[in-house]
Image (cartoon, helix red, strand yellow):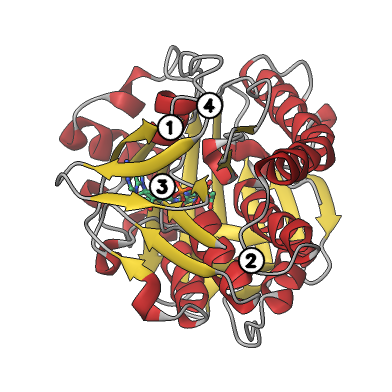
Amino acid sequence: MKIAIIGGSTAGIAAGIRLSQDGHQVSLFERRSTKSAGGFGLLLTPSVLQGLTTLGLDVDGLGHPVGQFQIQNEKGHSILCRELRQTVGVERSALLNLLSSGLDPQIMNDEKTFSHFESTGNGLAKAAIFQDGSRVEADLFIGADGVRSQVRQDWIPGPALEPVKSVELVGVYRGEVPAELLGRALKIMPQESGLAIGMVPTSDRSVVWYIQCDPRRWPQSIADPAERARWIQGLGEQHPGPVAQILAGSDLRGVHLWRTTDRDLPATFHRGNVLLIGDAAHPLLTFTSQGTGSAIEDALAIGDLLDQHGTKAIQQETLHALLGEFGRLRKPILKARLQMGRRMQEQFLNRPSVRQQIVPICC
Ligand SMILES: Cc1cc2nc3c(=O)[nH]c(=O)nc-3n(C[C@H](O)[C@H](O)[C@H](O)COP(=O)(O)OP(=O)(O)OC[C@H]3O[C@@H](n4cnc5c(N)ncnc54)[C@H](O)[C@@H]3O)c2cc1C
């Protein structure tokens, strides 16, 4: 079957690997140049590592093992501690490099920005049209183009993105990793609500850190880069120990402002021969650490369903039933994660008691 995937990040590459392994004729279209993958870091849970292994990728040596997630108050006292099994901290670029290593480079087309679909007039997409005017026909189109998906916008719009309630400032520290962070992810939750500082080791010499904020209480978090950098520097000075070392050793001007996005699930993940996967189908709040894992699971799930029908083009009714089955399998899981993320965000913004915090990883 001829399959065009739009978006060449976690979901798109994972689907590209899985579906090409089955012998489908796959092509992938990414608006950026692959060399500028960007992004900072993630915690990969055992299920994500298992998914990567299922795709035939070697996860040995990927990232830094994280055996414990600890939440501390601003005095450095442990409030909550959870042991983690087979979890690693990894820079997003390392994950994307690993995924890309499993993909035939011939199928990746960079600097191709999807614009809209040309329709057959009977509910099916005939061709994807790109901003450069090019046109690609396929039997199945997969929209893996992230939170602000143009595929979704054009073909399956559904509920709009909700206003941002929390933001995350993300940076990377390179240098000697403080002893407190070897094998451990740490989150500091000061008394004030709506602020948390987290650190995840990603190698023996790097730590990805993030500051979660309620921008209504901490407008400095969304101020201009210079003011924001001064504010982060001040936070470092107020929090001795690893926070001070990590923030003092980081380029605070290069911090990434991440506006966490929320959106209800669409009524269905497909219409006609167009399927949404990954963040395009179901943006998850960053509190859950589940965006990457869910994207990889989606890729494996569509691969498993298509396996049942070999590699030839399949009848439209069969394809419709199969894509519907994808939604029936995936929706309950994703709905639960979406709700969990909202509960975690609510708790973060209006925390009744720090002891009731959910450790921000759902496995
Ligand atoms: C730059 C960046 C940095 C990130 N950093 C972090 C992080 O530090 N921590 C974390 O937990 N999560 C991060 N994420 C999110 C995380 O990677 C995703 O939630 C998760 O991996 C799901 O991946 P996805 O492939 O569905 O979506 P995404 O990773 O968002 O990928 C979507 C891809 O589609 C491409 N695209 C978008 N529009 C078009 C278009 N019109 N035509 C063609 N291509 C298009 C984008 O360039 C992107 O490569 C980041 C995402 C991005 C894009």
Would you say 363 lies left or right of 272 here? right
Query: Depth check: 335 or 141 in front?
Result: 141
Query: Depth check: 250 or 242 in front?
Result: 250
Amino acid identity at mark 2? Lys
Q: Position of residue 181 (x, y in %)?
A: 61, 66
Residue wearing tag 3: 170
Image vertical order of residue 48 relative to residue 322, above or below: below
Q: CA distance from mark 1 to mark 4?
A: 7 Å
**Residue 23, quarter of picture:** bottom right
Q: Position of residue 59 (x, y in %)?
A: 64, 82
- Do the CB atoms of the residues marked 3 and 4 lie less than 8 Å apart? no
First in sequence: mark 4 vs mark 2:
4
State yes or no: Cβ of the residue under disc 3 lies below 8 Å from any atom of ligand 1.
Answer: yes
- Do the CB atoms of the residues marked 1 and 2 lie less than 8 Å apart? no
Q: 10 Å neighbourhood of mark 2: few (<14), some, or many (≥20)?
A: few
First in sequence: mark 3 vs mark 4:
4
Q: Which mark is residue 120?
A: 1
Query: Depth check: 66 or 11 in front?
Result: 11
Is residue 241 among the parts visible in the rendering? no
Amino acid identity at mark 1? Thr
- Do the CB atoms of the residues marked 1 and 4 lie less than 8 Å apart? yes
First in sequence: mark 2 vs mark 3:
3
First in sequence: mark 1 vs mark 2:
1
State yes or no: Cβ of the residue under disc 1 lies below 8 Å from any atom of ligand 1.
Answer: no
Quarter in which the N terminus is drawn: bottom right
- Identify which residue is drawn at 50% across, 64% down: 13
Numbered disc in front, either 2 or 3: 2
Image vertical order of residue 214 relative to residue 298, above or below: above
Amino acid identity at mark 3? Val
Numbered disc in front, either 3 or 1: 1
Q: Which mark is residue 123?
A: 4
